[in-house]
Amino acid sequence: MNSGNTENSTSNCGSTPKVEKINDKNHWETVYSKYDHTELGWFEENPQPSLDLIALCNLNSDAVLLNVGAGATTLVDKLINLNYKNIVATDISEKALGVLKDRISSHENVKTIADDLTNPTILKEIEQVDIWHDRAVLHFFIEEKDQYTYFELLKSKVKTNGHVILAMFNFDGATKCSGLPIKQYNAKVFSEKLGDDFKLKKEFNHTYIMPSGDSREYIYTLYEKIK
């Protein structure tokens, strides 16, 4: 459920209809119905920054990897190719998850869940995970109550010694995306939200080049849950 740009504006990475909040399911269903997923501004042919951070976690093939706001991400394909056997992809858009399932032929090692991270139901019931991966979803949650719900779910679902990968627009990044305002992040803000149970292992800035050719500035972080 990341967002993209078909405009020239450096402050907005999307030309999709303006909506009031990220958890507007109809907005994201429309996006994935109207556009081919490979044309969307968040499409990555090769999500190498995420793969590099996952590699640092030294997981076994049975580890549970949760990709939140997955959309139709190619990260899932890469994880399948790396022989991970327990991949969970969740998004608010059933259409996006349908595109993903069609592409991977509903691979037996992948479970998809349609749910809202700001008002989770199914996600509350899933088993704990070894990795929580989020690229460009959290930064849409500009209300404190939605951020609180997100981080409470994260904290409850990541195993001790598990890992969290958060990749959001940094303070040099855009202030809007897909017609929505966003919250910019750095590692200090992530650490404050996660609390003392999580230790920062790695951080770096990354310039992402969208299919349109425009660039967006991200902060990538890797945390370990230490207790």
Image (cartoon, rainbow, N blue to C red):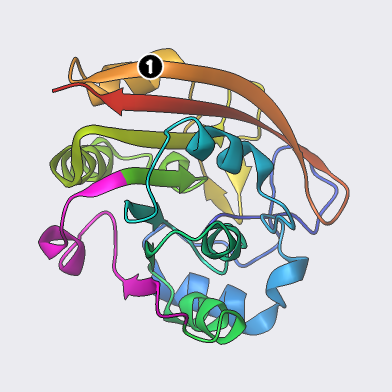
- Front residue of this view, candidates 17 and 23: 23
Vertical position of residue 55 compared to residue 100: above or below: above
Vertical position of residue 178 compared to residue 49: above or below: below
Vertical position of residue 208 compared to residue 107: above or below: above
Is 31 displayed left or right of 90 in the figure? right
Is 28 displayed left or right of 224 in the figure? right
Q: Residue at x 13, y 23 (%)?
A: 227
Camera sees residue 38: yes
x, y percent for residue 121: 15, 66
Q: In the picture, residue 11 is in which quadrant?
A: top right
Start and end of the magenta stretch? 107-130
x, y percent for residue 73: 58, 63
- The amino acid pointed to by label 1 is Leu
Dot 1: within a 10 Å radius of its alpha carbon, few (fewer than 14), some, or many (20 or more) residues?
some
x, y percent for residue 20: 43, 57
Residue named by callout 1:
200
